[in-house]
Amino acid sequence: MKVNLHTHTSYCDGKNSPEKMVLDAISAGFDVLGFSGHCYTSFDEGYCMSREQTEMYYTEIRQLAEKYKDRIQILCGIEQDRYGDDSAANFDYAIGSVHAFFKPCESLPEKYPGGIIPADGGCYIYVDWTEEAMEWAVRNLYNGDSLALAEDYYETLASFSDDPDVQIVGHLDLLTKFEELRSAKGKKPLFDTEHPRYLEAARHAIKALASAGKIFEINTGAMAKNYRSTPYPSLPLLCMIHEAGGRIMINSDCHEAGKLDWAFDQAAELAREAGFKTLHCPIPNKTIQEVKL
Ligand SMILES: [Zn+2]
Ligand SMILES: [Zn+2]
């Protein structure tokens, strides 16, 4: 069974219309295509769907599901940001993602880069905005302690374990998005991902999410955009998910037609390397399909 449940369209920051993506999925041989537009997030409306767009998105995906039901199963999901404004309850499924997390602080320096959003009592830090924003946050909000930032990120992610509407954990170690870029510029990694503190923070989140029954995605989106040569999460974290009894699926976080199954073979290979034998796909009615790798 060929499945992708992480797909963006021109309703948010994707390039193509939903119908174009459906036709693309059919020609690529998909059995199930799930859409996951970014939920409305009031503190940054730049890349998410507005409330009106969310309604239109919902209606159009349902219409497409009906129109193409003999050729492919179409699901209407949502990518639920931790600090998104609305609940994901009405959708077929939700991917819980932390793009930004809240950092309490008394005041921000006068100048701060994009990706740092001031808010009452602190600010939101986007971990996937730019390499500069991440470096700035570590230096100015964490006194240079990048592991403390990683601890806050993973703690925020872990809190999805209490959200019954979220079935899938999005791009587990998104905070490492720019590490290859840094290395290409001759810079040291921002995060020491072998440090016991980093591993402990990730392990704590993985255990909480796995015991809550959440499914972790292997996400190839940053590979399609040339940020990374490997998917999220890294192999050591994937092994940790396996040890914790967690379940996985493969998603492309696709923003552009032609890339729906980007690097799926590499993702499957990585899953096998971590010890997985099957993938799990949540489908409506709260059942979960198990598929051989
Ligand atoms: Zn995302
Ligand atoms: Zn996404």
Image (cartoon, helix red, strand yellow):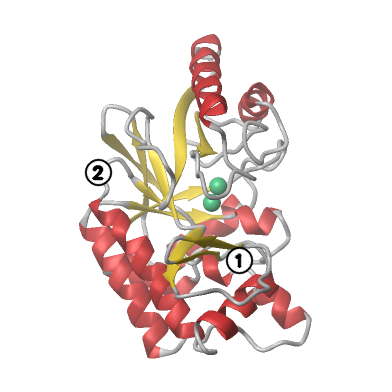
Residue 25 is left or right of residue 248, and the answer is right
Q: Which residue is mark 2?
A: 164
Q: Secondary structure at mark 2?
A: loop
Residue holding disc 1: 230
Q: Going by the image, does 260 lie left or right of 157?
A: right
Residue 211 in which image quadrant: bottom left
Please determine whether, in this image, residue 147 is positioned above or below residue 231: below
In the displayed image of the protein, which residue is found farthest to the right?
Answer: 185
Q: Position of residue 153 (x, y in %)?
A: 43, 69
- Mark positioned earlier in the residue sequence (1 or 2): 2
Disc 1 to disc 2, how far (Cα)? 30 Å
Residue at 46 percent of width and 77 percent of height? 149
Dot in front, 1 or 2: 2
Q: Is residue 193 visible?
A: no
Give the residue drawn at x 56%, y 33%: 50
Determine whether 122 is above or below 71 in the image.
Answer: below
Q: Amino acid at mark 2?
A: Pro
